[in-house]
Image (cartoon, rainbow, N blue to C red):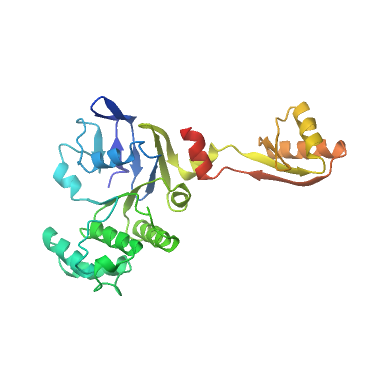
Amino acid sequence: MPDQIVETKSLSYHFGINQVLDNVSLRVEAGSIYGFLGPNGAGKTTTIKILLNLLHSDSDKVYLFGKEFSKNRIEILSKIGSLIEQPAIYHHLSGRENLINRARLLQIPKIRVGEILKLVDLTESADKKAGKYSLGMKQRLGIGLALLPDPELLILDEPTNGLDPNGIIDVRNLLRKLVSEMGKTVFISSHMLSEVEKMVTHLGIINRGKLVFQGSLEELHKISKKQILIQASDPVKAKVLLSENGYPTDLLAEILYTPYISKEQNAEINSLLVRNNHKVYSLSQSQENLENLFLSITQ
């Protein structure tokens, strides 16, 4: 298996005169959960439709499993499972019947249906009408349908959209299991930033058709703006003192904020305040969460 499961090279796309994607170069590593983030209208769904050949791109722009898409379309699509927005299920059929129907169409042995029901934790509800399923159960059934042919790559567009907390946890645990125990690669688009932070290993952030960040979760946190949070006896005078000594400081809700540089600087700030008769009640370091990082990058 190649190291890069998905790779796009300066991919651009237009709807009429409107440019939706602008030189997007994705790199999705094998065995990763890649979170594709962006506000509404950023180009996420357009990118996914190109990866699934639902929209056509220029030749030599899209590579999956190390092969150029347009020249290896059937082989590539046979290795991909997908769920776009909402699962395509028959509500008058049971969960088991939905899977059996899809298995027949794909000429997959019926024994696979039982395996999928167990994998997506629907065995106990297998004979219940899918129309009676909760939204979370429908999403798990949709993922099960995508997994029937045992694909190497799973592409999901907003799979946790509209789910309650229990449904979100179920989907998160399932995706982790697919990667850690079954060796799948998962590409997931979402605007639920706090949830994506809990499940992904790598991220791509797209805004107005441009890929503005790509890398591991750790790499994203490295570029976050770390700050020192200080609680002092007289925060107003402490702010003036710090600013006059080269530490640009903001004051909000009785807490002082100044950019973090090093542990040594923390000690210097503490010493400066104490020498000038300020009582330091606390001094701590903060780091922006993924949601704040996302907002700062896209804005």
Residue 113: quadrant of the picture: bottom left
Could you tell whether 234 is left or right of 16 in the image?
right
Camera-nearest residue between 238 and 261:
238
Residue 147: quadrant of the picture: bottom left
Q: Is residue 10 in sight in this rendering?
A: no
Residue 87: quadrant of the picture: bottom left
Residue name at image x 51 percent, y 39 percent = 293
- Provide residue 10's location: percent of width, then percent of height: 30, 29
Residue name at image x 24 percent, y 56 percent = 146
- Provide residue 257's location: percent of width, then percent of height: 69, 38
Camera-nearest residue between 16 and 204:
16
Image vertical order of residue 261 relative to residue 33, above or below: above
Residue name at image x 19 percent, y 45 percent = 76
Could you tell whether 32 is left or right of 250 in the image?
left
Could you tell whether 70 is left or right of 168 in the image?
left
Q: Is residue 225 in sight in this rendering?
A: yes
